[in-house]
Amino acid sequence: MPRSARVIASVAPSSLTIGADMMAAELVLSIDDATLAYEAVKRLEYVGIAVALIRLSDSDTLEETTIIRHVDKAVIDNGRVLIESVAGPFKSRTLKRPVDGTDAQITLGQSYLDFVAGNPNLPETTVPPSE
């Protein structure tokens, strides 16, 4: 059975401007679920990863563990604790052919779904006013 895809908006990732302290990523989903995509984008942006592109995987098989393919291993290794604090454990791989304008490809796995189920809220970002 052929799969259909909805495109809400389209822009070349290389034409986006993101902050110097952020990394642009392609988000790959095995499940066609807008709520899942929204939550992943929110969590990744919380730690400085701007999702420039979201696509549905060619495979219906959900990876056991989230996989982050990257162009700079040091960036992922240095950010591992921060990323895992909002998205759970992941495996790191080298990205051989990134989409122009992206630094990483993130394929969500079952580990992400399990993590979000047990950690539904992001940490608070506001500081209470001092008296």
Image (tube, rainbow, N blue to C red):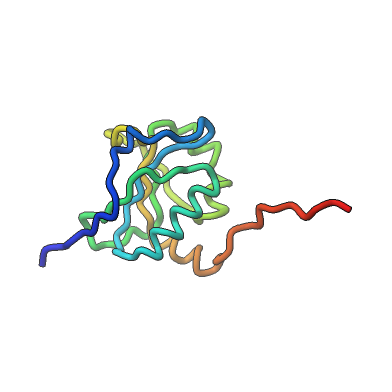
Relative to residue 108, is residue 78 drawn left or right?
right
Where in the figure is residue 22, as x and y percent of width and height?
50, 36
* 61 versus 101 height, above or below: below
The foreground one among 8 and 124 is: 8
Where in the figure is residue 128, as x and y percent of width and height?
77, 55
Q: Residue at x 47, y 66 (%)?
A: 114
The foreground one among 91 and 129 is: 129
Where in the figure is residue 2, as x and y percent of width and height?
11, 63
Relative to residue 78, is residue 95 drawn left or right?
left
The foreground one among 9 and 36 is: 9
The foreground one among 71 and 43 is: 43
Give the residue at the far left of this rendering.
Answer: 1
Q: Residue at x 40, y 46 (%)?
A: 51
Q: Residue at x 28, y 52 (%)?
A: 55
Write down the quadrant of residue 5 in the picture. Answer: bottom left
Give the residue at the far front of this rendering.
Answer: 9
Where in the figure is residue 72, as x and y percent of width and height?
43, 31
Give the residue at the far right of this rendering.
Answer: 131
* 110 versus 78 height, above or below: below
Number of numbered markers? 0
Q: Residue at x 59, y 59 (%)?
A: 122
* 73 versus 121 height, above or below: above
Quarter that holds the N terminus: bottom left
